[in-house]
Image: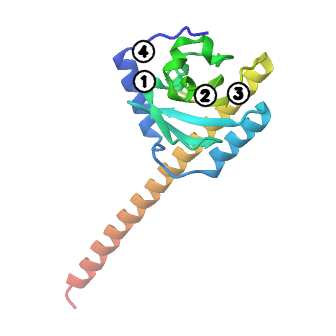
Amino acid sequence: MDNTTTPSQDTEALRLRALHQYEILDTPPDGAFDNITAMAAQIFQVPIAIVSLVDYDRIWFKSHHGLDAQQIERSRGLCASAILQDSPYILEDTRTHPEALTNPLVAHEQGFRFYAAAQLKTPEGFNLGTICVIDYKPRRVDNNENKILETLAELVIAQMELRLSSNRVSRLHRKVADLYGDHHSAHADALDTQPS
């Protein structure tokens, strides 16, 4: 199920700009995202669930339930292929997909055998990353599970949008405080210079 096509440089530049606007890369762990990956692992009965963000040359994990890795090279990551799709990207048995075998987490004997991901799509239509569930044995995914995965992806994006709005509000508060401070200082200086 690999109908991926390489995006144009312009499209990828816009996607990366959209990703960086969220100011989420390399941020500390966040309980809201960790709760979503824990929920995904429980629903799908898998040992690993990840919220991944595909950067210029790496895939960074905002949340990684059941996995110690923090990031992986983009060129070897399954999530880099997943974001090129418009529907859930399902590898029911990674050993039957040659492109998956370049991933070091798949290639070794005890590697991943099952990978299912839904894209983290912004309101503008950019796929920033995925929420994915992973198992060490092959398995099937039905239409209902696909819909669940897509809903979890929407939940991740909603959290990212909430975080983005909160950051914007915080910046506006600081701006107002700075402007008020400058205004207050100028007013105080004006009073000090008035003749008594």
Task: Residue 87 in the image: state x and y as whole percent.
Answer: 63, 16
Quadrant for the N terminus in the image: top right
Crowd rating for badge 2 (residues with CA inside 10 Å; few <14, some 14–19, many 20+): some
In the picture of the structure, the residue carrying the numbered disc 1 is 75
Q: Secondary structure at mark 4?
A: loop
Pair 2/4: label in front: 2
Pair 1/3: label in front: 1
Per the model, the C-alpha gap separating discs 1 and 3 is: 24 Å
Of 168 and 63, which appears nearest the observer?
A: 63
Q: Which numbered disc flags the more N-terminal residue, 1 or 3?
A: 1
| Amino acid on which disc 1 is placed | Ser
Q: Residue at x 63, y 25 (%)?
A: 117
Q: Which numbered disc flags the more N-terminal residue, 4 or 1?
A: 4
| Amino acid on which disc 2 is placed | Gly
Pair 2/1: label in front: 2
Crowd rating for badge 3 (residues with CA inside 10 Å; few <14, some 14–19, many 20+): many
- Vertical placement of residue 170 versus 66, above or below: below
In the picture of the structure, the residue carrying the numbered disc 2 is 111
Pointer 4 with pointer 3, Cβ within 8 A:
no
In the picture of the structure, the residue carrying the numbered disc 3 is 149
Q: Secondary structure at mark 1?
A: helix
Q: Residue at x 65, y 42 (%)?
A: 65
Which mark is on residue 7?
4
Q: Quadrant of residue 46?
A: top right
Q: Residue at x 39, y 32 (%)?
A: 17
